Image (spheres, rainbow, N blue to C red):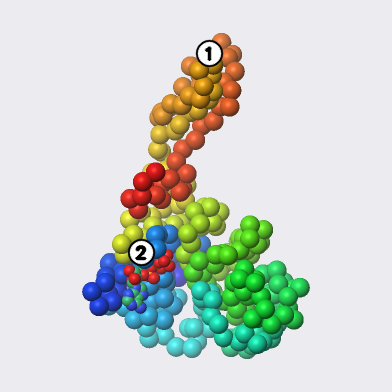
Amino acid sequence: MTAIQVRGLRKSYADTVAVDGIDLDIPQGQVFALLGPNGAGKTTTVEILEGHRTRTAGEVSVLGQDPAKAGRAWRARIGIVLQTANDAAELTVRESVRHYAGYYPRPADPDAVIEQVGLTEKARTRVKQLSGGQRRRLDVALGIVGRPELVFLDEPTTGFDPEARRHFWDLIRALAADGTTILLTTHYLDEAEALANRVAVISGGKIVAEGTPATLGGRSTAKATVSWVDETGPRSILTDTPTAVINELSAGGRELAELTVTRPSLEDTYLQLIGGSR
Ligand code: ATP
């Protein structure tokens, strides 16, 4: 079953083409990450899928319906984590999550959701008194309290400390294990690598590559770099056959100091795909 299907999606603002013919197929239960530089068209794409922006052209189906025409019943099946809304600043965390729970036909227990995002100690704190990262965690709580089938997460961990990010990753994995489909945009390549089954890289409104994090852009078959240190200093060789290189170098049982074999990281591949220099 496909959760999201997009064909030839285009969006223009006056003379700016923000999305320039995108196709996407995201099966149910998948964690899919959209990567791309600032202004690439990620938020525009996601907001069209959420039904929050109109499109200029193309076909879009989200949970079997066109978001431009879908109604309340469809909306209740979807969780949206916005880039920080500023409403309800006077409410406490618990009041705010309870309030949102009231919008959905079969919500989760608000206190359990507060626990899941690690805000139990702040449950009685007013929203306006939360730190930036805590506020973001509340945004996540509000996005999942309705037990959605599909969750949109636009840069969900921006402003999180490293521990909070790891907790958040666990939460996303738990949602995915329950069969929730997740579409996430992120600027953190490690986040995409840790969470996503598939990633697509958008640049200039077009998808320039799509695949699993391990194979994106031919990563898994790219040349390896064998590095070590000898009497003359650091050495490295770029090769298709790292095993043979190491066999040769270590002939006679010679120990190679600081030996490593690396292939391009997801970040290296990503930067190459979007035309960045490194
Ligand atoms: P970021 O990583 O910075 O969030 P993004 O990939 O989400 O970027 P979008 O916000 O989708 O990018 O923007 C894509 C392009 O569309 C940009 O050139 C942007 O200036 C333009 N754009 C976005 N929203 C509007 C708007 N409401 N009116 C006019 N142009 C817009």
Q: Secondary structure at mark 2?
A: loop
Residue displayed at 62% across by 68% down: 133
Residue pushed farthest top? 252
Q: Secondary structure at mark 1?
A: helix
Task: Indicate the quadrant where residue 231 lies.
Answer: top right
Check disc 2 and report the residue beneath it: 40
Image vertical order of residue 30 relative to residue 221, above or below: below
Q: Amino acid at mark 2?
A: Ala
Residue displayed at 23% across by 74% down: 15
Task: Indicate the quadrant where residue 115 lies.
Answer: bottom right
Residue 240 image offset from top left, x and y in percent: 40, 29
Residue 254 image offset from top left, x and y in percent: 58, 14
Residue displayed at 51% across by 32% down: 261
259 or 169, nearer to the observer = 259
188 with respect to 167 (left or right): left
Image vertical order of residue 7 relative to residue 217, above or below: below
- Other residues around mark 1 within 10 Å, as few (<14) / some (14–19) / many (≥20): few
Asked if ligand 1 lies within 8 A of label 2, the reply is: yes
Q: How many marks?
A: 2
Task: Indicate the quadrant where residue 60 lies.
Answer: bottom left
Check disc 1 and report the residue beneath it: 251
- Is residue 142 among the parts visible in the rendering? yes
Residue 233 image offset from top left, x and y in percent: 52, 22
Q: Nearer the viewer, mark 1 or mark 2?
A: 2
